[in-house]
Image (tube, grey):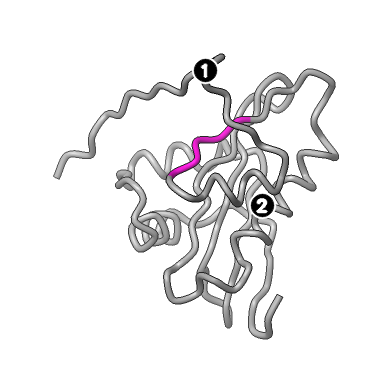
Amino acid sequence: MRDGYAIVERTPSVEDYLRLRTVAGMGRKSAEAAAAGLPHTLFAIVIEHEGRAVGMGRLVGDGALFLQVVDIAVEPAHQGQGLGKAIMAALMAWTERHALPGTYVSLIADGEAKRLYAQYGFTETAPKSVGMARLFPVKD
């Protein structure tokens, strides 16, 4: 990784989490939901540039049967420098150390991000299965 960057094994703060999701163009979350959910992270990576969080990624789930890769986000000014790959490599290294036989690791790939995830062994599940979601919108 380039100079000035550090990969830190920690859950992002609520403020960093909300900011990174917003600048990366991901769906909005409430501060209340972030404060309640982030402590339940199984494993997380924050990439810092000169001490400031500029990227993140998390693993959530029950730790044995199911794991889900979520919140892969990099500030646009820091994209294209391999930070997404560094985040995924760290998350997958943790998974390789902790996953048990039969653990199902999933993610939702937005757009061309599927190319990044394919590099780590993820394959599209359709037509055998199709991802579905229900979103409770953030109210202003």
The residue lying at 57 percent from left, 78 percent from top is 49
Identity, as a three-letter code, of the amino acid under mark 2: Met
Looking at the image, which is closer to me, 116 or 55? Answer: 116
Q: Of helix, strand and loop, which mostly describes the magenta segment?
A: loop
Where 50 sits versus 125, above or below?
below
**Marking on residue 60:** none
Q: Residue furthest top?
A: 128
Q: Earlier in the sequence, mark 1 or mark 2?
A: 2
Q: What crowding class fits label 1: few (fewer than 14 Cα within 10 Å), some (14-19), or many (20 or more)?
A: few
Q: Label 1, label 2: how many angstroms apart (C-alpha)?
A: 25 Å
Circle 1/circle 2 CB separation < 8 Å: no
Q: At which x and y percent is residue 64?
A: 74, 23
Residue linked to disc 1: 127
Q: Position of residue 55 (x, y in %)?
A: 53, 63
Q: Nearer the viewer, residue 122 or 26?
A: 122
Question: At numbered mark 2, what does the secondary structure look like: helix, strand or loop?
Answer: helix
Queried whether the magenta region covers residue 109, the answer comes back as yes
Q: Quadrant of the C terminus?
A: top left
Task: Identify the amino acid type marked 1.
Answer: Pro
Q: Tell me the residue that label 2 is attached to.
A: 88
Q: x, y (%) of residue 60?
A: 59, 34
- 89 inside magenta stretch: no
Density class for disc 2 (Cα within 10 Å; few <14, some 14-19, many ≥20) is many
Please report the bounds of the magenta region as a residue range: 106-110
Instruction: Tell me what residue is drawn at x 50 percent, y 47 percent.
Output: 71
Q: Is residue 111 above or below residue 80?
A: above
Residue at 78%, 18% in the rendered image: 102
Q: Secondary structure at mark 1?
A: loop
